[in-house]
Amino acid sequence: MNLDKTDERILKNLMVDARLSARQMAIKLGISTVTVLSRIKKLEKEKIIQRYTAIVDHEKLGYSLTAIIEIVAKNDKIVDIEEEISKFENVCAVYDITGSTDTIIIAKFRGRNDLSEFVKNLAAISNIKNTITHVVLNTTKEDFRLT
């Protein structure tokens, strides 16, 4: 699907505030409400808009520790490992990457004990050869919206 400037403007506005009504967005963009609604429906149908969600402050919810974990797999079982890890509640992202590491995980934890237990559970997953855990000291930016 090719996006035009109107689609891009609608997406950018939704990424900033998904609670904007179609009417509010139409006024803001200078187009009709019907146009906004039909474009959003089209973007949803094409799975460009996959879901609507809130961006929360994880630290205020008690998740004060972020870890970036590298995984090296054995026996070409990368996809199976990634699918299993994706199901873990505190995992925010799982990336299949190039280089000497097969997978990168970004996960949030309430503290060191939770991280320690998580890493031990990772080590118990069959076909994981090695893990390298990096603890994030400070977060300068954490926003996956492209605005």
Image (tube, rainbow, N blue to C red):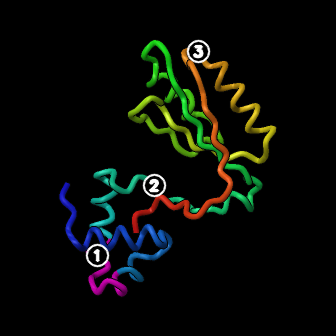
Residue linked to disc 3: 126
Mark with earlier residue (2, 3): 2
Comparing 102 with 41, the one in front is 102
Residue linked to disc 2: 51
State the predominant SS element of the stretch in magenta.
helix
Foreground mark, 1 or 2?
Answer: 2
Q: CA distance from mark 1 to mark 3?
A: 52 Å
Magenta-colored span: 26-36
Image quadrant holding the N terminus, namely bottom left
Q: Which mark is residue 131?
A: none
Give the residue displayed 50% in from the left and 29% down from the top: 82
Quadrant in which residue 140 is drawn: bottom right
Report whether 115 appears left or right of 145. Answer: right
Give the residue displayed 76% in from the left and 33% down from the top: 116
Q: Amino acid at mark 1?
A: Val
From this view, report whether residue 66 is shown above or below residue 113.
below
Q: CA distance from mark 1 to mark 2?
A: 21 Å
Residue linked to disc 1: 34
Mark with earlier residue (1, 3): 1
Q: Are marks 1 and 2 in contact (CB under 8 Å)?
A: no
Q: Amino acid at mark 2?
A: Arg
Label 1 neighbour load within 10 Å: few <14, some 14-19, many 20+: few
Quadrant in which residue 24 is drawn: bottom left
Q: Are marks 1 and 3 in contact (CB under 8 Å)?
A: no
Foreground mark, 2 or 3?
Answer: 3
Give the residue displayed 65% in from the left and 50% down from the top: 136
Foreground mark, 1 or 3?
Answer: 3
Mark with earlier residue (1, 2): 1
Residue 105 lies, in percent from the top left, at 55, 39
From this view, report whether residue 63 is shown above or below residue 120.
below
Q: CA distance from mark 2 to mark 3?
A: 33 Å
